Image (tube, grey):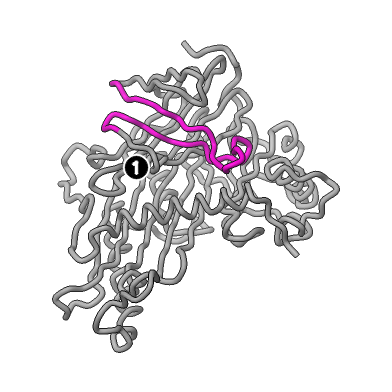
Amino acid sequence: MIFLSPVRTSIGLSIALLLSEILASCQSDSNSKTTATQAEKTPASAVRRDTPGTWYRCYRGTLGPDSITLHLQTWPANRTSAVFVGSYSRADGQPHELGTEFDAVAKPDSVLVRDRDLEFSDATSSGPLWRLRLNGKELTGTWAGQQVQLREVQMPSSTSFLSRYFTDSVAAYSNKSKSVYGRTSLHTLEPANSPESTRNALMAGILRGLRGDTLDTQAVPASVQQYWQQQLQNFQKEYQASVAGLLKSQPPEPDTSSNAPSYDYMLRYEDQVATHVLWNQGNLLSLGFFTYSYTGGAHGNYGTRAVTYDARTGRALRFTDIFRPNTTAQLSMLLEQAVRRALHQPPTVRLDKFLFVEKMPVTHNVYLTSGGAVFIYTPYEIAAYAQGEIRLFVPLEQLRPLLKPGLPLSGGGEISRQPAP
């Protein structure tokens, strides 16, 4: 029997609610074909720029007495608000995940994000709220009552990016005057400051990451636009094929006798792909490829797949490139310690009392920071959907004997708790 703590369950539910709010906002006008940002059609000779309303920025500064680095991204969610995601690190090189706070009213120059890490959660499962204001290159405000003062920077040996966002909708029934729509969107990044060979290798790696490739052998699309067109065409084909068989069983009038979701609502399929910067400094680049899919039913499915790159060459560092052979047993022990820390469970409680597993599996879904590694378990992988994604940080001092030589770890990350200049 599995026992979930009320706090942990609420955290997972809050993540699910956050996703459902994004879905609801995207579907708020589902009877008309509207898009937040259509696919760009920019001549090849034109200067490449961020898609309007989207960007990736790195900020450096202070949070109370500590020096931090913040990676922050935004793109549109609907006509009145934006999605913000990010992560920040202190001196230990451990990244802490941030997500949009949709419950608070934001002004146009406001950035409202909330800590999603378990260690910051209170009795109501909510981490501290960041109330920040954008003023040029400055980002200032508060976190849990502490002052935050940040300034946009380019970290040494880091990769700068252009932020690209595409979205479109597809009619379920092309022969009906009023059809429900499914929606698909793509957010990705294009490296902008590396040498051409490195930039091309990174871009190919990003396209493979978006596609979910586990090997680097297959050819990739020639451009982000080409990948987007493939994604849109695949969504249109699969969506219309899926709903075609449901047309005969669709009720002629919506059921208003209960509070259950309408039949139309169940056909508002959603397919989202987004690229998150997880780490970007000291020749070490880690990206997360987030996917969300709703194909009817109670809720959608989501998850993040992480890939680390050597920013000097653009080469993707797979699990076998990072860890020495025959390290599974040691990693499993370290991950058990990490999951107990994260979920506040003592060694006396068996794992299968709060997880689906009796022994921690070693996921290959891992990324590096200068301070260690983060292992990502997606919903249902080791715990219930309500648990959400479980991200476990293992410090570098514990991992060092298990790592292969030659990794781009030196010189990156936070090395001082002194305030940044």
Kindly give the residue lying farthest to the right in the view shown.
348
Is the residue 56 above or below the residue 200 in the image? above
Q: Determine the image quadrant of residue 395.
A: top right
Tell me: 46 left or right of 85: left
Residue in the picture at 80% in, 51% down: 329
Image quarter of residue 396: top right
User: Is 161 above or below relative to 220?
Assistant: above
Q: Is residue 131 magenta?
A: yes
Quadrant of the rendered structure where residue 95 is? top right
- Residue 198's x, y, as percent? 41, 39
Q: Which residues are magenta?
A: 107-135
Quarter the N terminus occupies: bottom right
Which residue is situated farthest in the bottom direction here? 248
* Mark 1 secondary-structure assignment: strand
Viewer-proximal residue among 406 and 302: 302
x, y percentage for residue 325?
A: 74, 50
Residue 219 belongs to the span the image colors magenta? no
Q: Is residue 310 visible?
A: no
Identify the residue shown where x is 31% and y is 53%: 25
**Between 142 and 323, the one nearer to me in the picture:** 142
Q: Which residue is mark 1?
A: 190
> From where the camera sits, is residue 304 visible?
yes
- 343 horizontally vs 100: left or right: right
Q: Residue at x 32, y 21 (%)?
A: 137
Of the pair 199 and 285, the residue shown nearer to us: 285
Amino acid identity at mark 1: Glu
The residue sitting at 27% across, 52% down in the picture is 166
Q: Is residue 286 above or below residue 236?
A: above
Residue 181 lies, in percent from the top left, at 26, 68
Side (left or right) of 55 relative to 159: left
